[in-house]
Image: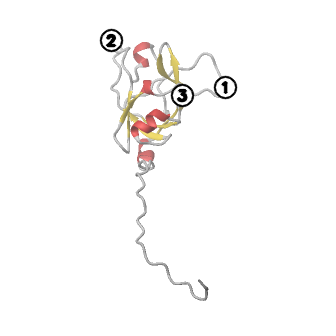
């Protein structure tokens, strides 16, 4: 379970298909169910360890560091939180499926959107980051002679 479960008792687990947003509360980034309309009291939720998520509008600094685009499929790899209260300062960790690179919840910005998805359907859908383009090599040939033109 996510680190918020160590801080709050009995938070609901995000289900497959739930839209989730990163919210910055209590000096940390936490997960909340995406509300249809703005609310002052977000409905915090937990994402179970091993959940597959489509994460959208990744911050530019993460896109650059990881060599990925603004949307990625990742798995929450943090172990379940310790409910004894000793785990309250941990930071949930995610692994990008296609590259194996990792990032932390607190690297995301408030408002980052997520959707918990069925892992079987989304592992094969993600495309790898674009490779660096190589310049095209053109072999030079002599220009053909122009016929019918006076020089």
Q: CA distance from mark 3 to mark 1?
A: 13 Å
Q: Which mark is residue 37?
A: 1
Residue 22: give x, y in percent of width and height: 51, 26
Looking at the image, which is closer to me, 5 or 93? 93
Find out whether the residues at labels 2 and 1 contact each other: C-beta distance under 8 Å. no
Q: Position of residue 143 (x, y in %)?
A: 49, 78
Element at label 3: strand
Residue bearing the label numbered 2:
86
Q: Position of residue 104 (x, y in %)?
A: 40, 28
Coloured how?
Answer: secondary structure
Where is the C terminus found, in terms of image quarters?
bottom right
| Label whose residue precedes the other's in the sequence (3 or 1) | 3
Q: Is residue 38 above or below residue 86?
A: below
Q: Residues within 10 Å of mark 2 (few under 14, many from 20)?
A: few
Q: Quadrant of residue 136?
A: bottom left
In the displayed structure image, the side of residue 89 where residue 149 appears, left or right = right
- Which residue bears the numbered disc 3? 21
């Amino acid at each position: 379970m996510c680190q918020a479960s160590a801080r709050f008792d009995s938070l609901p687990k995000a289900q497959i298909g739930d839209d989730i947003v990163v919210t910055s509360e209590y000096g940390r980034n936490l997960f909340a169910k995406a509300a249809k309309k703005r609310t002052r009291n977000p409905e915090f939720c937990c994402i179970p360890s091993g959940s597959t998520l489509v994460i959208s509008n990744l911050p530019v600094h993460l896109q650059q560091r990881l060599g990925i685009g603004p949307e990625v499929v990742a798995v929450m790899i943090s172990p379940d939180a310790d409910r004894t209260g000793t785990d309250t300062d941990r930071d949930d960790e995610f692994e990008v499926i296609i590259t194996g690179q990792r990032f932390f919840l607190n690297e995301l910005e408030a408002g980052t959107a997520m959707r918990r998805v069925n892992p079987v359907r989304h592992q094969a859908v993600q495309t790898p980051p674009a490779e660096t383009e190589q310049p095209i090599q053109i072999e030079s040939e002599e220009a053909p002679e122009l016929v019918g033109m006076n020089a």
